[in-house]
Amino acid sequence: MTSIVVTGHGSFATSLVETAEMIVGSTEHVHAVDFPVGSGVDELTERVESLIDRVNPAGEPGRVLILADVLGGSPARVALAQAAAGRADVVTGVNLPMVVDLALGAGTSSAPELAARAVTAGQDGIRDAGALVRPEGGVR
């Protein structure tokens, strides 16, 4: 079973996971790790490492995928440190379509498979929806 860890600035991760639960129901394999204002990178690192230890106690490779909010931010840097240590795979730019898609398949695929799926689902969720309803030609 693969676990998904969502992390980001502020309470973004918790909000994203809770919103995904509104859509798909239980997200037992999806966990949020927030980075509240005023907390430090060491605290975030400790929370992420603790969660990884809890969801993958045997340390099996390919069993944890971390979804971080933005490349270069502290949550992503913490996630990438876990990837460098061989403890997780990482995708940045997490969004709701990505979390919803992965929540439905987290238990059946490896972390690298889910990482590829996450990128596709995240990109597919980005649309110029206004163009769908504009009159023919779509240009204003």
Image (tube, grey):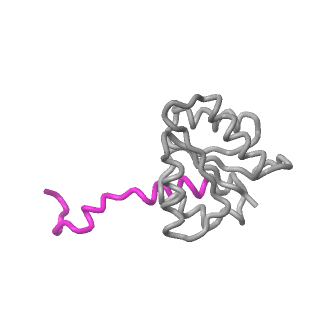
Q: Nearer the viewer, residue 132 or 17?
A: 17
Query: Which region of the structure is painted magenta?
Result: 116-140
Drawn side of residue 135 relative to residue 43, left or right: left
Q: Is residue 98 above or below residue 104?
A: above
Q: Give me the residue at 56% from left, 71% from top.
A: 25
Q: Was residue 56 drawn as part of the magenta stretch in this picture?
A: no
Q: Position of residue 71 (x, y in %)?
A: 52, 36
Q: Where is residue 120 in the image (x, y as percent from the top left)?
A: 52, 57
Which residue ends up furthest to the right in the rendered image? 58
Q: In which quarter of the image is residue 89?
A: top right
Q: Give me the residue at 64% from left, 66% from top.
A: 105
Q: In which quarter of the image is residue 3?
A: bottom right
Q: Was residue 117 drawn as part of the magenta stretch in this picture?
A: yes
Q: Where is residue 44 in the image (x, y as percent from the top left)?
A: 62, 35
Tag count: 0
Q: Position of residue 21 (x, y in %)?
A: 54, 65
Q: Nearer the viewer, residue 123 or 78?
A: 78
Q: Nearer the viewer, residue 104 or 46?
A: 46
| Quadrant position of the C terminus in the picture | bottom left
Q: Is residue 108 above or below residue 17?
A: below
Q: Give me the residue at 61% from left, 68% from top.
A: 26
| Quadrant position of the N terminus in the picture | bottom right
